[in-house]
Image (tube, helix red, strand yellow):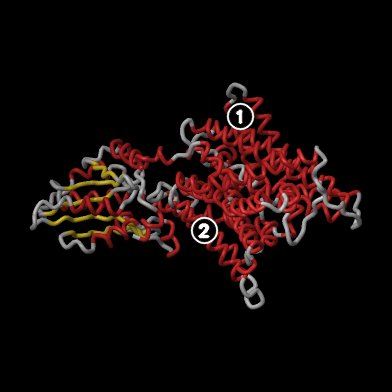
Amino acid sequence: MIKRALLGHPVATAEEMQERLPKKFALPVFASDAISSTAYATEEILLALVLAGAAAAAFSIYIAIAVVVLLVFVALSYQQTVHAYPNGGGSYVVSRENLGLLPGAAAAGSLMVDYVMTVAVSVASGAAAILAAFPSLAGDTAAHPDRNRILICIGLIILVTLANLRGVRESGRFFALPTFAFILLCGGLVLVGLVRWIAGDLEAHPAATGGATLQGMALLWIVLRAFSGGCSAMTGTEAISNAVPAFKPPESKNASITLGIMAAVLGFLLLGVTALGQVLHVTPQEENTVLGQIGHAVYGGGFFYYALQISTMAILVLAANTSFTGFPRLASVLARDGLMPRQFMNRGDKLVFSNGIIGLMVAAIAILVIFRAKTHSLIPLYAVGVFSSFTLSQSGMVVRWFRLRTPGWRRRAVMNGVGALLTGVVTAVVLVTKFTHGAYIVLIAVVVLIGAFYTVRRHYQRVARYLEPQNEDQLERLGQLAVSRLRTTVVLFVSQVNELTARSLALGRGLSPDDFHATTIASDPERVKALQRTWAEMEIDVPLLVVDSPYREFTRPAVEYVRSLRPGPKHTVTVIIPEFVVEHWWENFLHNQNALRLKAALLGVPWVVVVSIPFHIGVQTESQDE
């Protein structure tokens, strides 16, 4: 009841197309992160430049132009990726396919860290805006200086998590209004401000004077730091290429158009806000943001100013939504390739990757608690991973064009090559300028994730080796096994064909050769198709029955099917549940535990006999020794 109240009614697999997003909803879902960076990107540029003296602020517009030029190249490069990979061409997919497993794992690890940091930074910034507007919410800051801020952040993350667990279409509607409100109010700010400036009707702040004046290499270092800060505007650019399957058909075309719209809006707002900040002589202040100062100068202290502040607060919080769409999809692809636990492949009642969403929620809350939800502590860790994944992705596309040599491949290779070169330079700049401020933590986290990916992969490969049939003729001889006279219907639930399946089939035919059902639950249509092909190729003399599961469940359809098999009161149903026992306790978390759930569900059915066939991974069984 609580689950239904929070998440709504489940969505059948057949209704998946209805859950896909049109461009008008895809933009707020996948672009809120990038567009929201307008609220702090200009401020990050100015925070670095003021260290070089008041005159250095004049560099802000040139740095913004450089960031927008980089944005254009990255957007054009990712548009090519969207068309080349219509099933989702994130940095991991492109890097692994074209550069190999290690670069792919590095790209995936970098993106996963960046997704977590995006949630943490966005929510911490939103909480700071809330506390600035309503200081009383901070509570007793002397006794508990960070408690209320952390609790607000946790509450906001849970809110965004619940919105995403309700489904892609519903979250798109939920996030549309705040995102479009910010675009309209911030875009109006730029247009009204420029018109008033041209008309001479815009009162600028007094120009700052004094301060340290740097030249030569010191000034260059400050400019590079400002550029790396401005590049935070580009985080989230890759989200659309990761989520092409979430668009309505034609998927690639709609994703490409949405990516172009996002880049145009972001570029316009970043240039406009930075230009207004320069002509108004705005400098960063503790009590008000740069965008807030510009809004007050252009809109005055009336309705539109407060509307801008509220929409800014809202989009900063909702920017986390981009990560909640990108992270679960990336985790599902990694799980499909055996680099993450298989549970991340499972889609929940609302056709979303629920485990990935919950995993991101837990990771983001942990980061916020560790860093006390302080934005200035989180910013140095932000955007480091995304540019390395940009570089790997674009390099992979260059290799792809040279390998396939499709019409126009040279032009495309040049475009992706330029994108790889530019993002590679930015990666180096960001690493160098932010290394001592926390970038090293990101590097350590990425290395740890790569190690975890390889550990999970080795485990699954090891399990697959142990489950391989030891005798190639064994499956073909299953129909010739001894006949049992037991009065029972025997059911075997099958997910794949391997050594454990062979033993289970042998036992099932022995128990009830005339009333034996090999069954699979269609919770994953692609897996079922692959199983049916293998079943036919192996010529197994037992029909394979497929039980439909429109909501991608396993346990409930399995139990309902078992209940439907009992022909009379004196008849029993024997359910054979093959399962393997891993060598280490932690390896249990890498498997779905469907067998355990099914046994628990059948425990209360008196006429059902459950036969468990354990297969110990890492232990040579007697049959193998023979």
Quarter holding residue 602 = bottom left
Query: What's the residue at 13%, 49% (across, down)?
Result: 483
- Residue 401 at x, y percent in the picture: 61, 29
Residue at mark 2:
361
Instruction: Please tell me which residue lies in front, 460 or 251.
Output: 251
Q: Please indicate whether residue 387 sits to the left or right of residue 84 in the image.
A: right
What amino acid type is highlighted by mark number 2? Met
Check residue 368 in the rendering and tell me which mark sits there, or answer none: none
User: How many numbered circles are shown?
Assistant: 2
- Residue 592 at x, y percent in the picture: 38, 55
What amino acid type is highlighted by mark number 1? Trp
Query: What's the residue at 51%, 41% (across, down)?
Result: 25
Please state, as top left, top right, bottom left or bottom right, where the N terminus lies in the image. Answer: bottom left
Quarter holding residue 122 = bottom right
Q: Identify the element where label 2 is drawn.
A: helix
Q: Is residue 450 visible?
A: no
* CA distance for labels 2 and 1: 38 Å
Q: Please indicate whether residue 506 sits to the left or right of residue 495 in the image.
A: left
Residue furthest out toward the top: 407
Query: What's the residue at 66%, 25% (across, down)?
Result: 411
- Residue 287 at x, y percent in the picture: 73, 61
Quarter holding residue 422 = top right
Q: Earlier in the sequence, mark 2 or mark 1?
A: 2
Instruction: Please tell me which residue lies in front, 191 or 106.
Output: 191
Check residue 401 in the rendering and tell me which mark sits there, or answer none: 1
- Mark 1 Cα within 10 Å, few/some/many (few <14, many 20+)? many
